[in-house]
């Protein structure tokens, strides 16, 4: 078989040679004692990037999100967020399991929340409704196909949260893809949010980890919660070193991923049997649907895999393809050719 073209996720990225070198040479210490200089340096770099006072290196994006949820909520409270957001759907119910909080989903328009809808979902503490403790936003929105909420929309949503005295957490797993696409700093997109989580291990291609940033008080307590959740790591500078190289060298190439995703979407739109609106592809995630009722997404993904192209089958008819560091222009052409062969025409 030809070389595999893995479009399942940007989490499949391998560390660069420079990352491996930095990891081999990293100066480390016991990070649970706060003695790992490489981790400290990554945390400060991340905090500076997002223009926040402090940062905390965490093993995964999910843990970063759940630490924020735990910090801001109490058992019996609600978290308002978009129906399809990662925190509600893909973190194993951690919000209720670890924090006793429940989701209050608000349907967005392909990932984009309307401020009025968020406003309606907020419950005051009347004594008989479940009180709202947190507003969570996701930008870019994974399940909506990497869609971006504009800085203006972010401002409006933050204003709704503020009006009701709610803290705001931003799941910015891929915030730098949004920042590149918009040409605005990530800190602008995150303006007004109390905490922001972003991932090093997706488009930035570091092997492990995410960072949660916020003010000193949140991050001090987040450190305790990280330990509570089993995320206290010892000589974590080994992996943090990869994260530092990721921030220094990989940020500027995210635009290539965004551009290739658009190219993929435009080519797929020309294939009978595929339903996709390339206009909705803002960053590096491409969702499309199969028009034929005779072929499930699972069957289609299996057929495609025979040509060495891996994609993620979601519902019966939905497929996700994600561009990343290892995907070239030629790979996009090969993937489109393979889709043309694998898809059942309508
Ligand atoms: C939007 C979003 N948030 C959070 C996460 C969680 O990241 P991790 O897989 O590191 O837990 C992901 C992972 O894909 C994601 O897409």
Image (tube, rainbow, N blue to C red):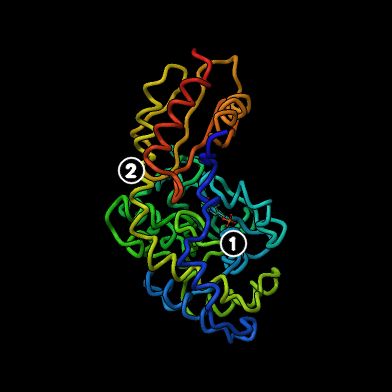
State the residue in front, 32 or 253. 253
Give me the residue at 61% from left, 22% from top. 296
Q: Is residue 93 left or right of residue 18?
A: right
User: Which of the pair 56/221 is nearer the observer?
Assistant: 56
Residue lying furthest front in this view?
1
The total number of labels drawn is: 2
Instruction: Give the quarter of the image for residue 306.
Output: top right
Occupied quadrant, residue 303: top right
Q: Position of residue 153 (x, y in %)?
A: 34, 50
**Looking at the picture, does residue 190 appear above or below residue 103?**
below
Q: Which residue is mark 1?
A: 60
Residue 327 circle label: none
Q: Residue at x 36, y 45 (%)?
A: 258
Residue at (62% x, 48% y) in the render: 90
**Mark 1: C-beta under 8 Å from nearest atom of ligand 1:** yes
Q: How many C-alpha atoms fall within 10 Å of the one at disc 1: few (<14), some, or many (≥20)?
A: many
Q: Residue 253 at what x, y percent from top left?
A: 35, 55
Q: Earlier in the sequence, mark 2 or mark 1?
A: 1
In the foreground, 273 or 230: 273
In front here: 248 or 113?
248
Report, in whole angstroms, how far the alpha carbon at label 2 lies from the one at label 1.
Answer: 27 Å
Q: Position of residue 220 (x, y in %)?
A: 56, 80
Give SS at disc 2.
Answer: helix
* 19, above or below 284, in the image: below
| Residue 252 left/right relative to 211 | left
Q: Which mark is residue 259?
A: 2
Give left or right: position of 87 versus 229.
left
- Residue lying at 31% horizontally and 62% vertically, measured from the top left: 185
């Amino acid at each position: 078989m030809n070389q595999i073209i893995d479009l399942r996720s940007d989490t499949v990225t391998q560390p660069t040679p420079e990352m491996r070198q930095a990891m081999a040479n990293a100066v480390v210490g016991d990070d649970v004692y706060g003695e790992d200089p490489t981790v400290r340096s990554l945390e400060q770099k991340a905090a500076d990037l997002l223009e926040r006072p402090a940062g905390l290196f965490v093993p995964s994006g999910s843990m970063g999100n759940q630490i924020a949820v735990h910090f801001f909520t109490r058992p019996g409270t609600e978290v308002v967020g978009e129906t399809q957001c990662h925190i509600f759907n893909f973190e194993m119910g951690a919000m209720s399991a670890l924090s006793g909080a429940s989701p209050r989903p608000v349907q967005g328009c392909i990932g984009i929340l309307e401020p009025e809808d968020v406003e309606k979902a907020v419950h005051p503490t009347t004594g008989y409704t479940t009180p709202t403790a947190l507003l969570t936003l996701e930008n870019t929105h994974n399940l909506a196909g990497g869609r971006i909420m504009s800085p203006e929309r972010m401002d409006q949503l933050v204003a709704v949260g503020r009006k009701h005295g709610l803290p705001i957490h931003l799941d910015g797993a891929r915030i730098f893809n949004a920042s590149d696409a918009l040409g605005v700093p990530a800190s602008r997109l995150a303006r007004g949010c109390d905490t922001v989580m972003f991932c090093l291990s997706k488009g930035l291609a570091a092997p492990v980890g995410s960072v949660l940033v916020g003010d000193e008080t949140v991050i001090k307590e987040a450190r305790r919660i990280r330990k509570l959740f089993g995320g206290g790591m010892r000589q974590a500078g080994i992996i943090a070193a990869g994260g530092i190289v990721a921030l220094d060298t990989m940020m500027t190439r995210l635009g290539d991923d965004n551009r290739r995703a658009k190219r993929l979407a435009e080519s797929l739109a020309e294939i009978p049997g595929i339903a996709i609106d390339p206009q909705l592809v803002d960053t590096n995630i491409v969702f499309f649907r199969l028009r034929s009722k005779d072929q499930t997404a699972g069957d289609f993904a299996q057929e495609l895999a025979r040509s060495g192209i891996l994609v993620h089958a979601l519902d019966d008819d939905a497929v996700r393809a994600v561009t990343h560091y290892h995907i070239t222009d030629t790979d996009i052409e090969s993937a489109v050719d393979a889709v043309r062969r694998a898809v059942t025409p309508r």
